[in-house]
Amino acid sequence: MELFLQQVFNGIMFGSTYAIVALGLTLVMGILHIPNFAHGHLYMLGGYITYLFVATLGLGYWPSLLIAIVVLGFVGIIMEAVVYRPLNEQPHINAFIAAIGALLVLESAVEVIWGPQGMRVPNPYPHTFEFLGIIMSVQRLLVIFGAILLIVLLHLFLKKTLTGTTIEAVAQNREGAMLNGINVNRVSSLTFFISSGTAAVAASFIAPIFVISPAMGAIIGMKAFIIVLLGGMGSIPGAIIGGYFLGLIESLGGGYVSAAYKDVIAFGALIVIFSIKPTGLFGKKEG
Amino acid sequence: MRTLKCSSLGIALAFFTLFAVFAGGAWAEEVVIGYTGPLSGPAAQYGRDCLAGVELAVEDINRAGGIKIDGKAYTFKVASYDDMIDPTAAVNNSRRLVSREKAVAVFNPVFNTIAAMMQINEQRGSEFLMMAYTSTPALDKIPNQLTVAIPPPFAAYAIAFADRAWEKGWRKGAMVVTLGAYGDEWRKEFRRVWEAKGGEITADQPANYYTETDFSSHLAAALATNPEFLLVGGPSDPTGLVIEQAKNLGFKGGFMMVDQAKLNYIVDVTFKGDITKMNNVWGVVRTLDLGVHSETQALIDRFVQEKNIKVPTSENFLNYSAMRILAAAMVKAGTVSDPAKIKAAFNEVLPLPVEDNPIMYVGLQGSRLLVQASIQFIEENEYKTPIQSFWWIDDEKELQRLVDMQPPEHKVHRRILPLEGYVMK
């Protein structure tokens, strides 16, 4: 029982990061119909920016996190303007290739600047304690509750503010939004800012627990894609539930069956869900 | 007018003589040493460390004037390609290195890719010497006349760990080792050795150290079986993380690390010099104790200064040694282009003088270079005296001979650990 609870705790913590990263990806994908393959790499860069400010420049953890959000947000804006916007009217395949180019640039740049070896961000809250037989650490709890807070804030922003609703409007009908006087380009920039900023939050939360390396982006990026497809393209609840779902599957599957089959289980679940519901769990029918 | 003509003729002659002198003696031909390995991606650090070892050796040899064969001088040049641990890429790279760069030997540090390269390195007309940096004993079972394996087979480490664990009264162990051919072989070998002693493996939870970010689910499952020790390991960075996470999960037992993970790297890089976080961890010997401290420290410093490596490891050192031995073997064989002859000369040049190479390689048997397998423990906040295992001998007299070859100031415990299939007849 304790092992089960421990695995559930681990799964939720994993799921929290997955959910945040997938959330950013689904925002961009659903709203701009751009498959931002470089999303995982923005996450990776977020980890390095946090490292730069915490470990190299000696700033506190929280200020560094805020800086990472802002820096990454602007990287997102630049990426949208330079990589994706010129391809707006072009066939989709061009944006695909551009995304892969962006991903390679980010990974190589980080490798050149910081080197290929793994690096560690000092843990601001290394304290561990036991609760109901589960061993928890403060930083891990922070990941879980931070993710919930971020999700709630993002929800409020999208639903309750005028700026937020413009994002939804563009998602629902691009031309219609333009006819209503919404500046679609500005919405695109904003969406990229939020998407990259949330990736930075996820990376900053997780960086003190793990090792950051240039290759970490590819793995999480791929997982985020699975989650977004699983939850339904562009669906925000889909990304959140898909994120926690994948986290739990991985940790329970890894703990009880074998870690060697972790990916088999996760991808297997994806195939099963698709064969039952081809649009994903929360996906709407193309109409 | 006439004098002017004469003197210009004289100058031309002088230049010609000078040129002739260079061409005959100091004018050196370049010998290309190939390298293919992971230079980008998750294993990039490992691949670059191995490459740096080869490079520094080449720079040292060139600085000393290269090598001389039949009065002709040769210098070395390293040509390196990235294969990202992809066997197809490694094979293509080696073909390119041999045909285009005319490389006679190619280094590679990963068993998966080495196995693929060993399929082609004996093809007539494009032979090359496979310089294999892998401790996987499976390599020795592949028949190949042109392979030189650089580190000791890890079976020696597995037995040395198991023996000490047994002496300590431990009976139950769990494994959270990296996935992939290398890790799989390690787990299989350790299980075999440990169960043969009568010990028990309570859990086997392999994890992909290259892609995984959190090991707590594997560890929680392994620790739930109450093991007395954990066998862990893969690349050093994530291995440090596994150790930290296991301790955070309340594990109080011992750790053994597979030979890919390095004690001093984890202490100095992952834990920023805090050795207390590595108490009760056993691993392969730290770089400093690979030889006499004054010699190894000098080479460590040079890797730091010249190759910009923060914490030099045995990847740097052993590849350095292998390159030095290779160059010496070329001189002995009297050729820079015949891999079979060069390999045949390895046994004649070993051991090298200690100033050329601080690690005591004593010979070559089959595909495997003979070098002691040393393990070390971190206990009570310090590195304990390492234990050297001589895995290719089974009698005391031979041990004494080998010990006498080592500099007396090298402080280690020594033992005979005859490995099945490796003992010299």
Image (cartoon, rainbow, N blue to C red):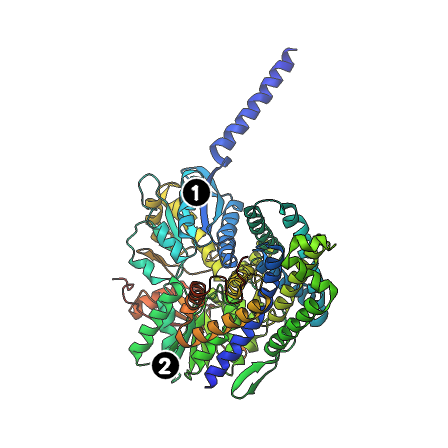
Of all residues, the one furthest to the bottom in this rendering is A132
Residue visible at 69% across and 56% down in the picture: A177
- Rendered location of residue A33, percent (x, y): 59, 55
- Rendered location of residue B59, percent (x, y): 53, 48
User: For the residue carrying disc 1, how many other residues have a C-alpha within 10 Å: few (<14), some (14-19), or many (20+)?
Assistant: many
Location of the N terminus of chain A (image quadrant): bottom left
Earlier sequence position, callout 2 versus callout 1? 1
Left-right relation of A79 to A134: right
| Kind of residue at badge 1 | Leu
| Kind of residue at badge 2 | Trp
**Where does label 2 land, which residue?**
B166
Q: Which mark is residue B152?
A: none
- Between disc 2 and disc 1, the foreground one is 1
**Where does label 1 land, which residue?**
B97
Q: Chain of mark 1?
A: B
The secondary structure type at the circle numbered 2 is helix
The secondary structure type at the circle numbered 1 is helix
Of all residues, the one furthest to the top in this rendering is B1
Residue visible at 65% across and 45% down in the picture: A86
